[in-house]
């Protein structure tokens, strides 16, 4: 009796499971990378992003004001001085809420 050729053997269920887990893990990593928060340093760019955003949150701290804009895929933040914050907030094109 001749042993079966190992190259013609169907893949084992364990190998198929490993391949599926690898693909799912790789996709999850790509999704996480795309949805990581990003800090914006240009006010005009932040106002432009706010045009396609769902909402904007304002967080007032001691010496700084953080503006957070949530789009469908990402959270963008901008840090400004308290004196300049009201000017930037008035230019935003989305619903603004205080945290």
Image (cartoon, rainbow, N blue to C red):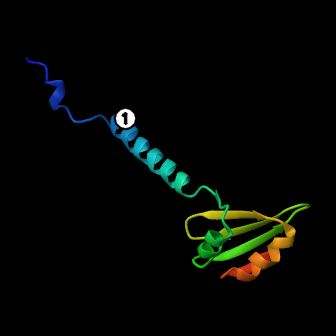
> How many marks can you see?
1
Q: Is residue 28 above or below residue 40?
A: above
Is residue 55 in view from this perspective? yes
Q: In which quarter of the image is the N terminus?
A: top left
Q: Position of residue 54 (x, y in %)?
A: 63, 77
Which residue lies at the image location 57% right of the left edge and 58% below the top edge? 35
Tag 1: Cα neighbours inside 10 Å, few (<14), some, or many (≥20)? few
Secondary structure of the residue carrying tag 1 is helix
Q: Nearer the viewer, residue 7 or 41?
A: 41
Which residue lies at the image location 89% right of the left edge and 60% below the top edge? 63
- Give the labeled residue for mark 1: 14
Q: Where is residue 77 in the image (x, y as percent from the top left)?
A: 69, 63
Identify the image quadrant of residue 80: bottom right
Extreme residue toward the top, this view: 1
Is residue 99 in view from this perspective? no
Q: Is 21 displayed left or right of 95 in the figure?
A: left
Which residue lies at the image location 75% right of the left edge and 76% below the top edge? 88
Extreme residue toward the right, this view: 62
Q: Where is residue 56 in the image (x, y as percent from the top left)?
A: 71, 74
Q: Quadrant of the C terminus?
A: bottom right
Q: Which of 79 and 97 is in front in this view?
A: 79
Identify the image quadrant of residue 64: bottom right
């Amino acid at each position: 009796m001749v042993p079966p050729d190992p190259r013609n053997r169907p893949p084992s269920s364990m190998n198929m499971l490993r391949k599926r887990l690898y693909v799912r893990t790789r996709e999850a990593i790509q999704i996480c990378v795309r949805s990581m928060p990003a800090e914006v340093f240009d006010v005009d760019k932040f106002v432009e992003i706010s045009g396609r955003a769902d909402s904007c949150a304002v967080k007032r701290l001691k010496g700084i004001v953080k503006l957070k804009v949530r789009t469908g895929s990402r959270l963008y933040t901008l840090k400004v001085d308290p004196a300049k914050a009201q000017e930037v907030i008035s230019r935003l094109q989305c619903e603004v809420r205080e945290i």
